[in-house]
Amino acid sequence: MMKLLMMSLALTSMCSAMPPSATDVFAIDEPGDAGFALRVTFTVPDLAATKEVRIERAATKAELAKDANMPWIVVATVDANAGIEGVLVADLPKDESNDGANANQTEAIAFRVATVGIDGEQAAFVESAAVIAKMNPFIMKRLGLAVSVVVTCASVITWILLARAGRPVKLRRIAALDAVDEAIGRATEMGRSVLFVPGIQDMNDIQTVAGITVLGRVARTAAEYDATLVVPTSRSIVMSSARETVQAAHFAAGRPETYKEGNINYITDEQFGYVAYVTGQMVREKPAACFYMGAFYAESLLLAENGNAIGAIQIAGTAEPSQLPFFVAACDYTLIGEEFFAASAYLSGERDQLGSLKGQDLAKAITAVVIIMGCLLATFAAFAPEGIAARASDSFQSFLGG
Amino acid sequence: MLKRTIPILILATSGAILVVAYFSPFTTNWSEVVLMWFNILAAVAYVLGAGNLLAVNLEKVSSRRAGWAYALITLVAFASMLTFGLFKIGGVPSEAHPDVPYAGDYESTQSAFGWVYEYMLSPLTATMFALLAFYVASAAFRAFRAKNLESILLLGTAFIILLAQTAAGMFLTGWIPADSVFAFLRFDSLRIAITEYIQTAGMRAITIGIAIGIAATSLRLILGVDRSYLSKQ
C-alpha cells in the first residue's frame, strides 16, 4: 500500500514537471503589414502548469549554408497566454534563393513551439506548417494617416484652384510678417546689417526649406533697401541654397550688382560652435534686425537673448514646440508652428499660394470636427463601456491611431 | 528654363516617392535611393563648405582684418583635426588586425582625434550649453514681469510649476490630505493639472497645426506652386 502511494506521488510530481505540449500551432502571414512578418498562434492546454513558451523558427537555406548545425533559431520566449492573440515574428530574412525574383517575400518558414513547466522542464516541440510572409502593397495600420494626408492635400488643391478661378482669399494679418519690412527698414536707417539664421538642420528638414523661402523675401526687401544681409549657415547645402535664393532675390529686385556671395557662409556643423560664431558676430557687428527661421534646439535662447542684449528687432519662426517659449520670451515677434510654414505663401502674395493657406485652414477645420467627434464618442463610451458607442470609439481610435 | 524645371521635377518626384514609401513597402527601396542621393549631395556640398571656411578665414588672415588671430586659430584647428582624422595619428590598431596601424578606431580617446574631441571640444560645447542657465534666468525675469493680465497668468503658472518641482512646494501644501476635497490645492496636484491638461491641450493644438502646415508646405513645393527657393536667372 505504501509502495503504491509512493509511486502515485512520484507519478504526480512527474506530471507537474512536464507540462502538456502546445496544440493548434499555426503560422499566419500578417495581413496589411510591411512584410517579412508572421504571426504564430498556439494553445496551451494547462496554463497553470506552464511557465512560458519557447518559439523557434526553421533556418532559411542561406542560414543553413552558413551554419548547418543550426536548423532551428530561437525567436521568442513568451508568456503562456500569448498564444491566444499570437506572437508576431518580424524582420524575417528575405528569400534570396531566386536571384531577387522573390525579394518581396520570405521562404516558406516553419515554426515550432514548446511549453516549459514551472520548474523549467520542457515539453516536446510541436511544429507548424511552413508559411511564406509576403510584402503587402499597403500598410493598413497607416490607413487613417493616409486618409488625413489625402483630405489635407485635397483641401489645399481645391483652394488653390478656387483662388486661381478668382475667388477672393481673405487672410488674417500676421504681425510678425508685417514687421519684416519695418525691421529691415530700421537696419537700413541705422546703417547696420540684417542677420538671418536659417536654423541648424540640413535641407532635408522641412523647417529649413521654409526658412530658406522666407529668406528669399527678406533678401529681396534687403536688396531693395540696399541693406547688408548676413547669413551664417551650419550646413553646406543650406549655404548653397541660401546663396542661390539671395542671388535670385537680388535679381528680382533689379539689383544683381549688390549681391555679395561672401555674406553667406558656412560656419560649422557643430551646434555650439555655430552658436559661438553667431553670438560673437552679433556682439561685434550689432545687426539691427535678426531673423531666426528654421529648426532650432538648445541654441534658440542663446541666440535670441544675445539679439535682445544688442537691441535688435528680432523675428523668429520655428516648428519646434519646445523652443517656442524661448523665442516668445526673447523676440519681438514669433511665428508659431503653422504660421512659420504659412510665412512664405503669405509674403509672396501670389493667388495660388494664398489659396493654399485657405486650404490649410479648411484642413484644420476638418481636423477640429474629427477631434470633436472623437471626444463625443469617448465620452459616450465612458458612460456605456459595453455599448455601441464604445465599439465605435475603439474603431475610431484604431483607424486614426493605427 | 531648365534651371527651374529640372529642380522642380527632381523635387516633385523625390517628394512623391518619400510620401508613397511611408504607406507602401513596395516603394521603400526607391525612398532609400532618394535618401542616398541626398547623402551624396551633402558629402559633395561638405567639400564646398570646407572650401568656403578656408577661403573666408585665409582672406581674413592675409588682409589682417579685425579678429584675424581667431581666423588663424580656426585654420590651425581645421588642419590639425583633418590631419589627425585622416592619418589616425596615435590610433591603437584594432584587435582583429593588430598589424595594421590604420585599422583602429579613430574615435578612441587614445588617438589624437578622439582625445581632442573628448577633452577639448566636448568641454567647450558643454561650457556654451551651460551659459543657457543664465540666459534662461534673464529671459524669465523679463517674461515674468506682471504688466498685464496675460503676464500675471504666466507668472502665476510659472510660480506654481517652480514651487511644485521643489521641496518647498511639498512643505507649503503637503499638509493638505491627498484624499480631501481640497487636494486639488496641493502644488503637486496643480502641477499635474497644468502640465497634463492645459499644457498638453495647447501643445497638441500647436502640433496639429504644424503637421497640417508641413503637409501644405510640402504639397506647395511638390506641385511647384512655391518656387521662391529657385534661381530666377
Image (tube, rainbow, N blue to C red):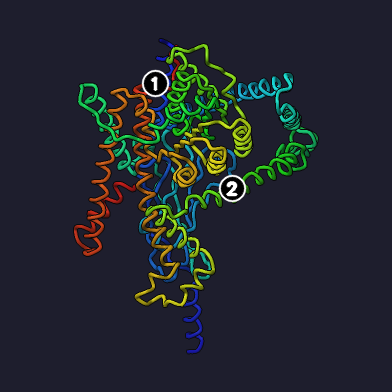
Observer-nearest of A256 and A369:
A256
Q: How many marks?
A: 2
Residue B128 lies in quadrant: top right
Q: Secondary structure at mark 2?
A: helix
Which amino acid lies under the numbered mark 2 shown in the image of this protein? Answer: Leu
> Which residue does the image show at 43% across and 39% down from the upper left?
A334
Mark 2 belongs to which subunit? Answer: B
Q: Is residue B91 left or right of residue B132?
A: right
Q: Position of residue A28 (x, y in %)?
A: 36, 47
In primary-sequence order, the first of circles 2 and 1 is: 2
| Badge 1 density bin: few <14, some 14–19, many ≥20, Cα 10 Å | some
Q: Is residue A29 visible?
A: no
Same chain check for tags 2 and 1: yes
Is residue A385 placed above or below A359 in the rendered structure? below
Q: Is residue A260 visible?
A: yes
Q: Is residue A402 left or right of residue A49?
A: left
> Which residue does the image show at 49% across and 20% down from the upper left?
A246
Label 2 and label 1: CA atoms lie apart by 37 Å
Q: Secondary structure at mark 1?
A: loop
**Mark 1 sits on what residue?**
B227
| Badge 2 density bin: few <14, some 14–19, many ≥20, Cα 10 Å | some
Observer-nearest of A107 and A292:
A292
> Which residue does the image show at 36% across and 33% down from the upper left?
A342
Is residue A180 placed above or below A325 in the rendered structure? above
Residue B45 lies in quadrant: top right
Is residue A15 placed above or below A76 in the rendered structure? below
Q: Which mark is residue B188?
A: none
**Mark 2 sits on what residue?**
B132
Mark 1 belongs to which subunit? Answer: B
Q: Position of residue B156 (x, y in %)?
A: 43, 60
> Which residue does the image show at 41% across and 56% down from the upper left?
B152
